[in-house]
């Protein structure tokens, strides 16, 4: 049985600084009973893939409600804005209330320590001796208050709002695609693109830029004349263009965070003179 797809696939509303509540309409996400049944079969193993998922997701009837992360400061200053766009949230970071909350053993995440800080993009000057919770609170507060060393005013967002495990068969954007299927993923991405474009209109205009760290984000938001994603092109700074439908906003793509050294190098190449 086929169903008509209508607008209003996903609704976002603020929950707390840095987090949104998302309500995904499963009747609109899936176009057939077969798609929906595959999702329902995948749901329990997906939920069990990270111990934090049970506190993040609510699957009730035709709605999937979950938390996601988006940290865009309301404050402004003279620094040009840069929106750093990641793939999707890790479930443990949603639970902790902050992007890239920690790595194994409670270590500071490479995103802060090995990419942004040495690239000269952002230094939040957070004491590593603080507890994980205190570090996350300080980072969030300083990002919102613009209280950091940077040439830029920084915002953080994810391209796919649905969280997933940080590792294993259900991890990352690929894990979300595995959960809902390829056709539903295309519909979800269309709704997510609208969120990012609306955010860009308010945060990046008039002199901002957006930086993607993930393939789907680049492919979904690049202008038609911009180069398609290739990892080798991302590694050499060859992915740059304009945000789709917003020709005054520069758009860049750097290697994924797992390739910290290359991501740092390309970020520095794009934004730090000399």
Image: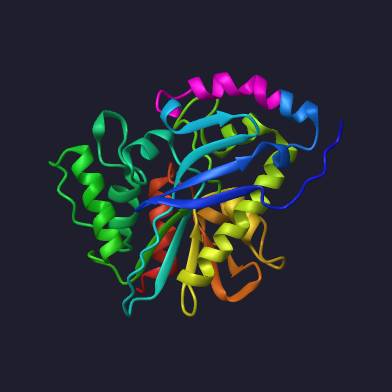
User: What coloring was used for the rendering?
Assistant: rainbow
Name the one closer to the observer, 267 or 98: 98
Q: Position of residue 31 (x, y in %)?
A: 79, 38
Q: Residue furthest right?
A: 1
Residue 229 in view in this figure = no
Q: Nearer the viewer, residue 151 or 92?
A: 92
Q: Which residues are magenta?
A: 38-53
Quadrant into which the N terminus falls:
top right
Vertical placement of residue 263 versus 130, above or below: below
Res. 34 image quadrant: top right
Q: Is residue 116 left or right of residue 25?
A: left
Decide: is 76 above or below 173. Answer: below
Is residue 124 a member of the stretch shown in magenta?
A: no
- Location of residue 265 (image quadrant): bottom left
The x and y percentages for residue 158 are 49, 50
Image quadrant where residue 25 sits: top right
In this rendered view, identify the residue nearer to me: 99 or 14: 14
> At x 67% / y 37%, what residue is drawn?
26
Q: Is residue 129 left or right of residue 226?
A: left
Apparent side of residue 197 relative to residue 57 in the rendered image (left or right): right
């Amino acid at each position: 049985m086929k169903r008509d797809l209508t607008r209003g696939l996903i609704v976002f509303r603020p929950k707390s600084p840095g987090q949104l509540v998302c309500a995904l309409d499963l009747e609109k996400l899936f176009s057939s009973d077969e798609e929906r049944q595959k999702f329902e079969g995948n749901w329990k193993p997906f939920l069990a893939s990270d111990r934090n998922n049970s506190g993040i997701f609510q699957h009730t009837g035709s709605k999937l409600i979950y938390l996601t992360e988006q940290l865009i400061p309301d404050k402004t200053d003279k620094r040009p804005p840069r929106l750093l766009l990641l793939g999707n949230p890790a479930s443990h970071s949603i639970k902790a209330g902050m992007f890239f909350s920690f790595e194994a053993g409670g270590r500071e995440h490479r995103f802060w320590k090995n990419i942004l800080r040495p690239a000269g993009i952002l230094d939040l000057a957070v004491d590593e001796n603080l507890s994980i919770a205190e570090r996350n609170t300080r980072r969030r507060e300083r990002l919102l208050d613009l209280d950091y060393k940077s040439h830029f005013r920084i915002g953080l967002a994810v391209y796919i709002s649905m969280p997933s495990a940080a590792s294993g068969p259900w991890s990352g954007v690929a894990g979300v695609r595995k959960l809902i299927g390829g056709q539903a993923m295309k519909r979800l991405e269309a709704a997510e693109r609208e969120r990012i474009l609306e955010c860009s209109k308010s945060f990046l205009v008039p002199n901002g830029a957006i930086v993607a760290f993930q393939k789907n984000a680049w492919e979904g938001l690049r202008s038609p004349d911009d180069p398609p994603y290739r990892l080798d092109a991302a590694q050499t700074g060859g992915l740059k263009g304009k945000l789709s439908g917003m020709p005054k906003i520069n758009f860049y793509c750097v290697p994924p965070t797992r390739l910290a050294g290359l991501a740092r190098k390309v970020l520095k190449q794009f934004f730090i003179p000399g």
